[in-house]
Image (spheres, rainbow, N blue to C red):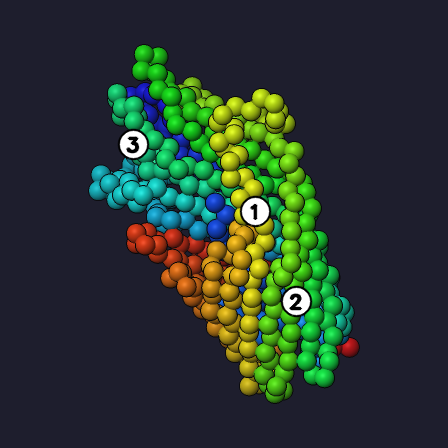
């Protein structure tokens, strides 16, 4: 976002692209897959019938009262992170760093990946402590999810440099969203005549809700300069709640059927005391500042929003801040077959029942998975598919108390644009039957 000759501009391609990357990640449409716990992810998300003990608190509360569950169990912590990007792949971004040194054919190929712009998404979930004792369970979890778009013109500008005399660069629909919140959960289940029923009550503590927008460049041909505003509107704090209800039973000692509806009732009230970050980039800043410097300057502009004097660009940036910023109701049904004591084969069906963007993107998901334990070693594999054509291939292992899960995610939209990503999880857990 500067005005200078193409040759000079190419010298700062890496800097410019790095700058935008930092701003995008610092802002963060919320549509990334929310990563699951390591065992659940390793089985492709097919874990409703397998979950026992602390694993049931955030997933299948009725499973706490199943007679084959542990007397107590503890998870500390479970950490999961996932990210996806449309258009380019990870290897493409590695090449972008050395863009100026690439052959013309490779440069043209990279530019073609941005023909329809791009969008990067991320999700982070950390059940920091989860505990169960008999039919009771407690847990505390932190979640962050968000994404950002980047227009074709901006990608071309950063990679190719400014085209002399051009004034029609467009940021397009370049915007971002991010949400972070704490979730404090308490579960209870009871077994009645062989059928377990249970629920989890959640106290939601919102942290930040962010909406950002990049505005169209203002070109000054005479001064050989260009300025552009990057605006973020932030809500900090609030309160909320939700309730999950479920039921489970074992029609046969080797078979478990479990179902739940999460967020049967829920509400999140984000704070209406807003803060704004309004940062202007020009040629001098981009040309002479490091990406970290630019990010620091952007964050340093934060100030309380004065409702009596709101600039138009701030109003436009905040327009959809609260839009669907709540938890959707989701139904989950799973069955698990255990032909042997250390072997589990499972399948789940999840359906999104109401709107709300603080959850996984898929409206419907079907998952299958298998788990095999050998002494202190456990191996898992799974597969998920969605109604919109997305799919996820997963795997994982346990070694004593350590659990690890990974997944590769991909999806193609109506324009045949591929979105690809990875999810990785790890955690520690233990349980005892005495």
- Which is closer to the viewer, label 3 or label 1? 1
| Image position, residue 375 (x, y; %) | 61, 78
Q: Tell me the distance, in whole angstroms, between the alpha carbons under discs 3 and 1.
A: 37 Å
Residues packed near mark 1 inside 10 Å, few (<14), some (14 to 19) or many (20 plus): many
- The earlier-in-sequence mark between 3 and 2 is 3
Residues packed near mark 2 inside 10 Å, few (<14), some (14 to 19) or many (20 plus): many
- Find residue 245 and name its label: 2
Judge left or right: residue 193 versus residue 399.
Answer: right
| Front-lying residue, 76 or 231 | 231
Residue where numbered disc 1 is placed? 325
| Image position, residue 55 (x, y; %) | 65, 67
Q: Tell me the distance, in whole angstroms, between the alpha carbons under discs 2 and 1.
A: 22 Å
Mark yes or no: residue 115 visible. yes
Q: Is mark 1 on a helix, strand or loop?
A: loop
Farthest residue in the left direction? 105
Residue where numbered disc 3 is placed? 160
Farthest residue in the top direction? 222
């Amino acid at each position: 976002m500067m005005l200078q000759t193409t040759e000079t501009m190419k010298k700062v391609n890496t800097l410019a692209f790095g700058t935008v990357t930092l701003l995008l990640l610092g802002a963060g449409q919320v549509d990334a897959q929310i990563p699951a716990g390591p065992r659940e992810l390793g089985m492709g998300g097919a874990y409703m019938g397998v979950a026992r003990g602390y694993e049931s608190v955030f997933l299948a509360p009725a499973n706490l009262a199943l007679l084959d569950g542990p007397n107590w169990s503890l998870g500390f912590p479970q950490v999961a992170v996932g990210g996806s990007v449309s258009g380019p792949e990870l290897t493409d971004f590695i090449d972008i760093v050395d863009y100026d040194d690439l052959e013309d054919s490779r440069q043209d190929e990279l530019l073609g990946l941005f023909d329809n712009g791009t969008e990067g998404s991320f999700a982070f979930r950390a059940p920091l402590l989860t505990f169960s004792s008999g039919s009771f369970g407690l847990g505390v979890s932190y979640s962050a999810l968000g994404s950002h778009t980047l227009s074709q013109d901006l990608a071309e500008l950063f990679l190719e440099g400014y085209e002399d005399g051009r004034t029609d660069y467009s940021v397009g629909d370049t915007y971002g969203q991010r949400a972070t919140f704490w979730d404090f959960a308490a579960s209870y289940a009871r077994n009645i005549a062989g059928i377990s029923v249970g629920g989890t009550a959640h106290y939601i503590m919102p942290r930040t809700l962010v909406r950002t927008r990049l505005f169209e460049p203002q070109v000054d041909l005479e001064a050989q300069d260009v300025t552009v505003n990057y605006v973020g509107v932030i809500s900090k704090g609030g309160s909320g709640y939700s309730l999950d209800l479920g039921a489970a039973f074992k029609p046969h000692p080797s078979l478990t059927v479990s179902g739940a509806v999460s967020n049967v009732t829920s509400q999140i009230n984000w704070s209406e005391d807003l803060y704004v970050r309004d940062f202007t980039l020009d040629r001098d800043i981009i040309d002479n500042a490091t990406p970290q410097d630019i990010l620091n300057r952007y964050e340093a502009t934060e100030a309380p929003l004065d409702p009596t004097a709101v600039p138009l660009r701030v109003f436009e940036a905040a327009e959809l801040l609260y839009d669907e910023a709540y938890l959707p109701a989701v139904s989950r049904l799973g069955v698990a077959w255990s032909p042997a004591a250390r072997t589990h084969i499972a399948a789940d069906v999840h359906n999104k029942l109401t709107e709300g963007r603080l959850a996984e993107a898929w409206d419907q998901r079907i998952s299958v998975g298998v788990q095999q334990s050998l002494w202190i070693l456990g191996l898992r594999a799974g597969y998920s598919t969605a109604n919109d054509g997305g799919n996820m291939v997963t795997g994982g292992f346990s070694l004593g108390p350590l659990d690890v899960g990974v997944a590769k995610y991909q999806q193609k939209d109506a324009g045949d644009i591929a979105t690809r990503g990875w999810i990785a999880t790890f955690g520690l857990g233990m349980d005892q039957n005495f």
